[in-house]
Image: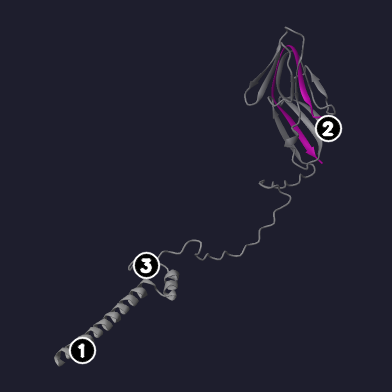
Amino acid sequence: MKQYGLLATVFGVTLAVLLVGFLVIEQVTTGGATALASPSPSASAALQTRGPTSAPGSRTPAPSATTMPRPTPPPDEPSPTPDASVAPGLTPRPTPPPVATGTVMDIVVPGTGYAFKDVPVNGTLTKVGAGGLIARTTRDYSDHMTVTYKLPLYQIPAGAKVVRVDVAICGEVSGDFWESYGPPTAEPTEDEVTPPGKDGCWHYRGGTIADTAAFVIIRGETSFTIDKVVYTITTG
């Protein structure tokens, strides 16, 4: 009987030890799983604020253009002050030298450079040579032809004061009737059915810049070749 009592006691003690061990193991297992499943708040914050980690051996991306430092530009240089007398985009013209008093110069107008013409139905104008002109009329009608020349003022040097204008009408003529005229203040004023001088020109001297008209008139069976008209100006 004593042996049975001892066995019962040993069995009870063993059962109690096993039960306590089982409870301890279950507690440890459950606590570890809970710790793994629910990280601490500090660990969660660390995971949220930490950026992605580059893989080993990968290249670090270059900074974007918006974050790269830019070189400091050099200080602005003072801009030149524009010339108010010159319009933008235009090259200033050089100032011509002054024309000396008493300067004499020739301005040549070709025969084809007339300023005005009055050609009747029985008249023709024909260009010849290097700027020459033939004025021709016939006896079919009695109307006359007039060819007028003027001094091209744009060829006079800027600032020049013209005090005298001489005119020479150079060419040749033949036929029924012709006449030529110089400026109204020149001497002579006209030539009628008169041959040119030895130099092949009719001369009219002493005119003024106020009226520089010089002209020829023909009618009948006449041919007048006008090679050129020479204006000789004198400054004062």
Residue position for label 3: 54
- Give the amino acid type for the residue marked by disc 2 in the picture: Ala
Q: What residue does disc 1 label?
A: 9
User: Magenta stretch mostly in which secondary structure?
Assistant: strand
Q: Are marks 1 and 3 in contact (CB under 8 Å)?
A: no
Residue 64 coordinates in the image, percent (x, y): 47, 62
Is the residue under label 2 in contact with that under label 1 (CB below 8 Å)? no
Q: Residue furthest bottom?
A: 2
Secondary-structure class at tag 3: loop
- Identify which residue, 17 or 31, lies in the foreground: 17
Asked whether 77 falls inside the magenta stretch, the response is no
- Residue 85's place in the image compared with 130, above or below, is below
* Cα distance between the residues tagged 1 and 2: 159 Å
Q: Nearer the viewer, residue 116 or 220?
A: 116
Q: Quadrant of residue 6?
A: bottom left
User: Does residue 196 show up?
Assistant: no
The image quadrant where one finds the C terminus is top right
Is 210 colored magenta in this rendering? yes
Compared to 137, does 89 lie above or below?
below
The residue beneath circle 2 is 210
**In the rendered structure, which disc, 1 or 3, sits on the residue that comes first in sequence?**
1
Amino acid bearing label 3: Ser
Q: Which residues are magenta?
A: 209-236
Q: Earlier in the sequence, mark 3 or mark 2?
A: 3
Distance from the alpha carbon under mark 3 to that under mark 2? 97 Å
